[in-house]
Image: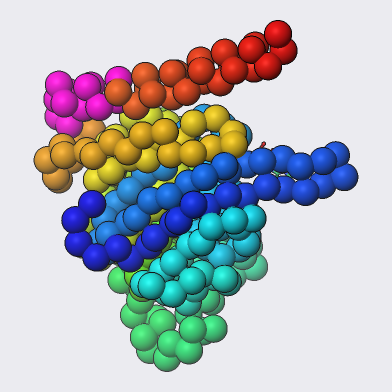
């Protein structure tokens, strides 16, 4: 990583306590993200990706270790951070029009009414939904609602954007459109982005660097720098030999992590 670290995760661990005992979700995760960087965190289902993101967001407190944003420890959701979650159907307020869903968080931030309206107008245009400002969320398709969620996150003018498998519940075509839209707006706004996914191709296609987590309790198994040229393109980028090499490298790492884990389990039983 070159440049100043905006986000710094140091020896982060997280265990959940419940009546059924302790679940160790994250064992030991450290990484740094530079200002303006796009990083992806990829790993198998249940490996602790959402847990990690919630710790980054200050929504969960780590069992050990620390998260720092601009040199300050994160203990609650920082004001300069925005999130996009997987489940768009729960992320919109159904009784508010699309434009008001976007301006709603801005009121709490103390943004003036004129500026709120301008931000909603601009971000909806950027995500291709300029015509839908007066619609209600339930009048839009899943992919469109997810674009509203992206617009809302951008309108917030965050320094850092956290996304948790945001495109997991849309069809393949919409998904690749949303990936390209995200790369466009990332290039335009330069917002530091941490994007969680279980999709290896998606991680390589989007990121400057990919952090590969292994199975729970997770650690960063490998960091893969992605030096594919930008702007990227769903067809030409994915045709590059370098793309295939990178996705194979990530895939092999995940497979290897799983194999060594099941070996350990077998040894443990012996
Ligand atoms: N609130 C919770 N209480 C207890 N266990 C949890 C809780 N949230 C997640 N877990 C467990 O922690 C592990 C990691 O979960 P999660 O971070 O959601 O993984 P991922 O997002 O990679 O699928 C899983 O085994 C999950 O069952
Ligand atoms: Mg998750």
Magenta stretch: helix, strand or loop mostly: helix
Q: How many marks?
A: 0
Q: Quadrant of the C terminus?
A: top right
Residue 92 coordinates in the image, percent (x, y)? 58, 61
Q: Is residue 154 left or right of residue 109?
A: left
Chain part drawn in magenta: 235-248
- Relative to the observer, which residue lies in front, 165 or 262? 262
Query: Can you say whether 234 is above or below 138 in the image?
Result: above
Residue 174 coordinates in the image, percent (x, y)? 39, 38
- Relative to the observer, which residue lies in front, 100 or 184? 184
Task: Report which quarter residue 190 is drawn in.
Answer: bottom left
At x 52% / y 45%, what residue is drawn? Answer: 28
Q: Is residue 156 left or right of residue 187?
A: right
Residue 185 coordinates in the image, percent (x, y)? 27, 58
Residue 110 coordinates in the image, percent (x, y)? 48, 89
Q: Is residue 64 left or right of residue 118?
A: right
- Relative to the observer, which residue lies in front, 181 or 128? 181
Visible residue check, residue 213? yes
At x 21% / y 27%, what residue is drawn? Answer: 243
Task: Report which quarter residue 245 is drawn in.
Answer: top left
At x 49% / y 84%, what residue is drawn? Answer: 109
At x 28% / y 43%, what residue is drawn? Answer: 209
Quick one: which residue is furthest to the left in this view? 229
Visible residue check, residue 177? no
Magenta-span inclusion, residue 242: yes
């Amino acid at each position: 990583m070159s440049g100043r670290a905006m986000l710094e995760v140091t020896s982060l661990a997280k265990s959940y306590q419940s009546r059924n005992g302790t679940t160790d979700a994250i064992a030991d995760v450290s990484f740094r993200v530079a200002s303006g960087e796009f990083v992806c965190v990829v790993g198998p289902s249940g490996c602790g990706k959402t847990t990690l993101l919630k710790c980054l967001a200050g929504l969960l407190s780590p069992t050990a270790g620390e998260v720092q944003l601009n040199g300050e420890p994160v203990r609650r959701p920082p004001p300069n951070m925005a999130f996009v979650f997987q489940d768009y159907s729960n992320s919109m307020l159904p009784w508010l029009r699309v434009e008001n869903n976007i301006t709603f968080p801005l009121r709490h931030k103390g943004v003036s009414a004129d500026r709120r309206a301008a931000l909603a107008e601009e971000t909806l245009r950027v995500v291709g939904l300029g015509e839908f400002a007066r619609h209600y969320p339930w009048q839009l398709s899943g992919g469109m609602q997810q674009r509203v969620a992206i617009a809302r996150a951008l309108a917030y003018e965050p320094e850092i954007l956290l996304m948790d498998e945001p495109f997991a519940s849309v069809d393949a075509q919409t998904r690749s459109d949303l990936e390209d839209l995200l790369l466009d707006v990332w290039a335009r706004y330069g917002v530091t982005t941490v994007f969680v996914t279980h999709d290896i191709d998606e991680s390589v296609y989007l990121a400057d660097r990919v952090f590969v987590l292994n199975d729970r309790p997770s650690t960063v198994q490998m960091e893969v720098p992605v030096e594919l040229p930008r702007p990227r393109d769903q067809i030409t980028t994915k045709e590059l030999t370098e793309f295939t090499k990178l996705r194979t490298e990530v895939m092999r790492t995940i497979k290897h992590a799983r194999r060594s884990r099941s070996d350990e389990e077998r040894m443990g039983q012996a």
